[in-house]
Image: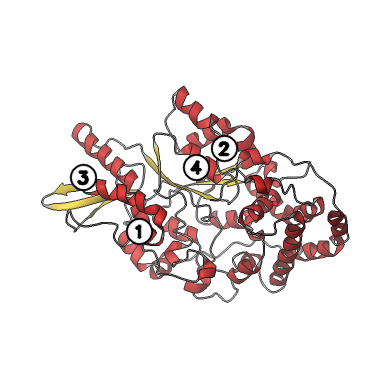
Amino acid sequence: MDGENPSDMKEHHYQPSVNNISYMKDYPSIKLIINSITARIEFTTRKLPVLQDLKRQELHMFSVIPNKFLPNSKSPCWYEEFSGRNTTDPYLTNSYVLYSKRFRSTFDTLRKAFWGHLSHVHGKHFRLRCLPHFYIIGQPKCGTTDLYDRLRLHPEVKFSAIKEPHWWTRKRFGIVRLRDGLRDRYPVEDYLDLFDLAAHQIHQGLQASSAKEQGKMNQIIIGEASASTMWDNNAWTFFYDNSTDGEPPFLTQDFIHAFQPDAKLIVMLRDPVERLYSDYLYFASSNKSADDFHEKVTEALQLFENCMLDYSLRACVYNNTLNNAMPVRLQVGLYAVYLLDWLTVFNKEQFLILRLEDHASNVKYTMHRVFHFLNLGPLSEKQEALMTKSPASNVRRPEDRNLGPMWPVTQKILRDFYGPFNARLAQVLADEAFAWKAP
């Protein structure tokens, strides 16, 4: 789970510490490291791969997903022939089922409904397959879970059977946890299975409308909310030939765009300084403290500088070895790098970029922005009240709250580091709120 509770945006009361004062003495030396990094920041435009090269990398995926979808479905859907019998288990080999017990009940439900949702024509059986109409692509600990939980209450929105499939970034490469090594790759069919429940409902709507109004548009839209989609390209070094400059030749968005050039993309961001501390509290397993966080930040900055001495900014951001070595996920907060790379393949109008700070202060306003962006129908007063007044999701654990805030000196160090990236993001979005300048 990568979301963050909006109620955690409140400031903590600061208690002075001997350690905090002693760490202030480190600031000049750390500032030199940050100056060394910022002096080398260069936002260059990446070279785009050609379609034929993408196809060579993913022959199977391109053989399964068509290049045209049904004209009367808002979601990208198509019919494919199903050759099994009514006793065939369509999910027998699905890797999501095989590798996780908690998904099995979900697929039991899908299995029971499967045969009844096939289309039977001239002795042949066809199943409706669908991809998401929109993706919530990031970032971790920025409120994506809360946005997802509210948005799925809209009657026209259906999500994947699993909140975060992580298919585009991890599972299609056979990655569950990178430190555990590679498993068998999850084929695209396993990913498509996750949208079967939504596909069943779209199929029913298409069947009903074909009997009454030919060509009536089905309004259901499918969403997917893996918070790794925007930034995680750690698998590239295992599967793609290394480019001479150390930059990945292909990124996740290249493949999504190849199939869905009109996809809609939602991004939720927060102050990257606060994001990093929240990320640390959520994922660190033991000995969590403001002291430990400070030390890990210092180590991560040193590692990042070492990379920047020899490689480009993009090469370091997408460097799998560096990302695994850093004790905190410093790179995830470099939003401008990722967004600029997404904007090389998708148009700016296809993005809705939100701030967690705004969502926390006015849930109703941000949800209305999402509805407008996705062209969703209006809600009843009761439905809207349920969506906007429900408590926030994925709250910070009490034991993590009790640790209090990071040290002010750590915060200052991180503000210095993220400052140039935030400034570039604010420039790209023409909105100074994304600079997250300290009050």
Q: Which mark sits nearer the N-terminus, 2 or 3?
A: 3
Secondary element at image label 1:
helix
Figure check: 407 above or below 439: below
Query: Disc 2 designates what residue?
Result: 392
Q: Quadrant of residue 322?
A: bottom right
Within 10 Å of the Cα at label 2, are there few (<14), some (14-19), or many (20+) other Cα atoms?
many
Amino acid carrying label 4: it is Tyr
Q: Which mark sits nearer the N-terminus, 1 or 3?
A: 3
Q: Which of these two is toward me, 394 or 348?
A: 394
Q: Which of these two is toward me, 161 or 58?
A: 161
Query: Disc 3 designates what residue?
Result: 116
Q: Quadrant of the C terminus?
A: top right
**Residue drawn at (24%, 35%) of the image:** 209
**Residue drawn at (45%, 59%) of the image:** 168
Query: Disc 1 designates what residue?
Result: 190
Q: CA distance from mark 2 to mark 4?
A: 11 Å
Within 10 Å of the Cα at label 1, are there few (<14), some (14-19), or many (20+) other Cα atoms?
some
Q: Along the horizontal axis of the image, is 258 left or right of 205?
A: right
Q: Along the horizontal axis of the image, is 88 left or right of 251?
A: left
Amino acid carrying label 3: it is Gly
Q: Which mark is residue 148?
A: 4
Q: Which mark is residue 415?
A: none
